[in-house]
Image: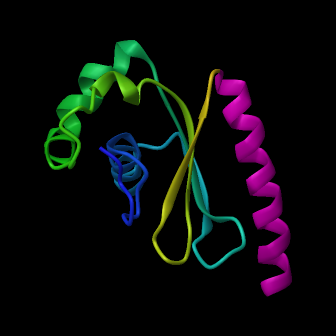
Amino acid sequence: MTYIGHKYSSARDEVLHAMSVQGWANRSDGNVEAPTGFFAIISNSPAELAEVVAAFDEEIEGTEDSDFSTSELVGHFVLVEDSQGFVGVYDYSTELGARVFYDELEDTFSKWDEEEL
């Protein structure tokens, strides 16, 4: 199923956003009004999957994608939410790759935030 016209590109992104909102991100920063938006880094290992699925069972069941597999939640992600509530998720093969992008967003946000003061 394609999530055209929705704030998410996939059911996976919808669940990852719920994780970020409910404090399950490894780190988060930003502001939806900033050029970077709100951003969060989330890494889930196969060993953590059962815990994630148990914690977010309602969100998983509430997705519109009947083909969604919870194994899609395993990996390293950087989530970005903009001022209109649209959510983008960047998928990385390594935690380091995700951290590099997250750190770039954090630096950009910090500069913007200092200018806003």
Q: Residue furthest bottom?
A: 117
Quadrant that contains the C terminus: bottom right
- Residue 79 picture location, percent across and down: 54, 49
Quadrant for the N terminus in the image? top left
Helix, strand or loop: magenta stretch: helix
| Residue 71 is a magenta residue | no
Q: On screen, 39 above or below 76?
A: below
103 horizontally vs 85: left or right: right
Q: Is residue 70 visible?
A: yes
Report the residue at 49% width, 59% height from top. 87
Q: How many marks?
A: 0
Q: Establish if 78 lies above or below 115.
A: above
Q: Image quarter for residue 65?
A: top left
Asked whether residue 109 is drawn in magenta, I would say yes
Q: Residue at x 43, y 23 (%)?
A: 74
Closer to the camera in the image, 80 or 112: 80
* Horizontal side of residue 81 vs 9, given as left or right: right
Q: Which residues are magenta?
A: 94-117
Q: Is residue 117 visible?
A: no
Q: Position of residue 116 (x, y in %)?
A: 79, 85
